[in-house]
Image (spheres, helix red, strand yellow):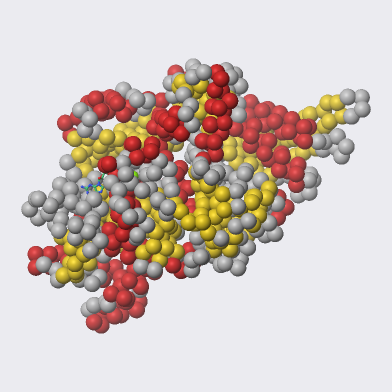
Amino acid sequence: MSRSIETIRNIGIVAHIDAGKTTTTERILYYAGASHSIGNVDDGTTQTDFDPEEAERGITIYSAAVTCEWDGVTINIIDTPGHVDFTAEVERSLRVLDGAVVVFSAVEGVEAQSETVWRQADRYNVPRICFINKMDRIGANFERTFDQVKARLSAEPVAVQVPMGAGSRDEEGALSGVVDLIELKALYFDSKSRGKDFRTEGIPAEYMDLANEWRSRLLDAVSMLDDAAMELYMETDDIPPGEIHRVLRTGTLAGSIQPVFVGAALDFIGVQPVLDGVKRYLPSPNDRPPVEGMHPSVKKRDKPQVRHPKNDEPVCGLVFKIVADKHGDLHFIRLYSGTLKTNSRLLNSRTGKKELISQLWHLQSDSREKIDQITAGDIAGIIGPKETVTGDTLCDQQKPVLLESIRFPETVISMAVEPDSSAERKKLEETLKRLAKQDPTFTAKVSEETGQTIISGMGELHLEVIRHRMERDFNLKVKVHKPRVSYRETIAKPAEGTGEFNRGTAEENHYCKVHLSVEPHTGEPSIQLINKLKHGVISDEFTKLLEETVLSEARSGSMYGFPLMGARFTLLGIDTRAEETNDVALQAAASMAVREATDKAGSVLMEPIMRVEVTTPDEFLGNIQSDLNARRALIVNSELRGDLSVLEVHSPLSQMFGYSSQIRSLSQGRASFSMEPLNYAEAPNSEIDF
Ligand code: GDP
Ligand code: MG
């Protein structure tokens, strides 16, 4: 059965690691009926973390799309990872989401990754609601966290609830429930039914002032957003709940505000209202702008192709995730338009090949349902495609469209692996291929110089997880070498290059000449290609091949053999001869032109710089700072958050290997850190000795 589009919510739950995303997701799946048992992160029995690797580590690594039902709406939850090594997973989820629930810890407040994710969500215009979690912990502070959301994220939070108390059950003034500021009622959640049952009562006298203060802030915000609400507020000094919901929905969809909920997921307090919030304030696919892509054919690609979320439009969807499954690879697709039926054939507009859709699945966290079709706006798992990778568009063969692929950050770390016995070399190769297909931020290749197999990823933890998966899922024992930084190169100055290929036998000659320039460039994509050749001087096929050759040559680097970054190539001229120019001549001439241009431009070695956030009790601050100083790290900010010191540090990745054990030993295990790629900077000369 297909779902009506207005009742679909495609959401992500995003947070800094440990803020309680998995716990909140668990509670949601429990209340929304998808799960009969209730899991607990600390016992390793949660529903979304079904990969044993994740359960072991208590972190969510691979996002899974899970479906549940709440009050007449279907909620597709894309579980997003909280660990920075996996930011690409967050990025890809955001592309296919319509809205997000951002979870904050009321103790730690707004942490580094919340900031990163918030910025990513801004980039994709994803409407958000917030959940301030862990109000049951000592040191929890609703107002402080709320203010941080406003200040650090430049957000417009609007509280729709306030907590009654803070801290654990046994303490005085402990968290007992939450005040609903819209209905002006107190909500108490029954712990025996795990929060499924709750009571609504009048607000206790001790919380009346607090409730009134925050309610007037709520009404002020609502009236600022909407003229009708403003008029009502001026006339009656009040706004009825229905009207508040309407205005909050419009404001949230427009990205002008973010409604804020509060509670403690672990103690089953305040999660059901968040579900109501998802239904009330977050968009259905119909509330989102239509998607825009381009025509895959070179000739027509300037003409934008628009697809509306309608069932009778041509089919168009984006594959955002592939997971290995016993029945074959399961391709998660977000369908933007049309009706997709099983046994239909779609065009993969990147490869130009047809793919068979042999099965369609709706996935719950612990069960699955085979379906005949899905309609616009929905998410499902497909079995059948053979050559489709993450980020590919699948579409109607007659109405081809190419959506922007999902952009993944470059890998920053790599290491050599070898099979335990040489008999397993082939198996290693196949396993790595499979893993790379599922995870676009992981690559594997054989080094031309040394013959070693090199795997690359986003961080030490990422590669360690990959290694465990090889052993556990594929039963493959491997030896690994020390991890190394993935350096890059950029060019020093603008230059031009010409490549001429002119070779042959007595019978036939091959000829082509390519002229291009290269110059330094900032911004995305990091390697840019501008084609200034007159339209029609060469065929579409030649144009495509020429562009591909320039880009792939750039990837193989110049002086140091590391991939090039920050360069713009411009194709300036081409000379061909009707009988003599073929693919081989064209590719050779293009490669030579790139090499000549980059040689003349000169090379600068670049190293990845990480943004590191260290959180530590004050007593270890001195030790940690002096250790960081010895690592070429720059401390860019230092502040107090609650009773912890937080350092923001920019450090070369090469200096951060093994930092997790170092920081543990410097702080008796009490300091923590998170790390994500920030940018690249010129590497000091001492680094050039690999
Ligand atoms: P994630 O990394 O964001 O997915 O966070 P988890 O859901 O795995 O939670 C991290 C830790 O915080 C676990 O030990 C949870 O039991 C704990 N936790 C989550 N929510 C709460 C809460 O509301 N109160 C308290 N006291 N602990 C919580
Ligand atoms: Mg988690």
Residue 546 in sight here: yes
Examine the rendered structure and indicate whether residue 239 appears above or below residue 309. Answer: below
Q: Where is residue 457 in the image (x, y as percent from the top left)?
A: 47, 33
Apparent side of residue 74 relative to residue 262 in the rendered image (left or right): right
Quarter occupied by residue 248: bottom left
Who is closer to the viewer here, 549 or 374? 374
Check the image and name the residue furthest to the right.
507
Residue 145 in sight here: no
Q: Where is residue 610 in the image (x, y as percent from the top left)?
A: 39, 34
Examine the rendered structure and indicate whether residue 261 appears above or below residue 492. Answer: below
Residue at position x 22%, y 67% in the image: 180
Apparent side of residue 253 relative to residue 497 in the rendered image (left or right): left
Apparent side of residue 85 relative to residue 436 in the rendered image (left or right): left
Examine the rendered structure and indicate whether residue 644 appears above or below residue 628. Answer: below
Q: Where is residue 74 in the image (x, y as percent from the top left)?
A: 42, 63
Residue at position x 70%, y 31% in the image: 591
Check the image and name the residue furthest to the bottom.
235
Residue at position x 50%, y 47% in the image: 321
Examine the rendered structure and indicate whether residue 555 appears above or below residue 288. Answer: above
Check the image and name the residue furthest to the left.
172
Apparent side of residue 447 relative to residue 354 in the rendered image (left or right): left
Picture mark count: 0
Quarter occupied by residue 676: top left
Residue at position x 60%, y 57% in the image: 342
Q: Position of residue 164 (x, y in %)?
A: 15, 60
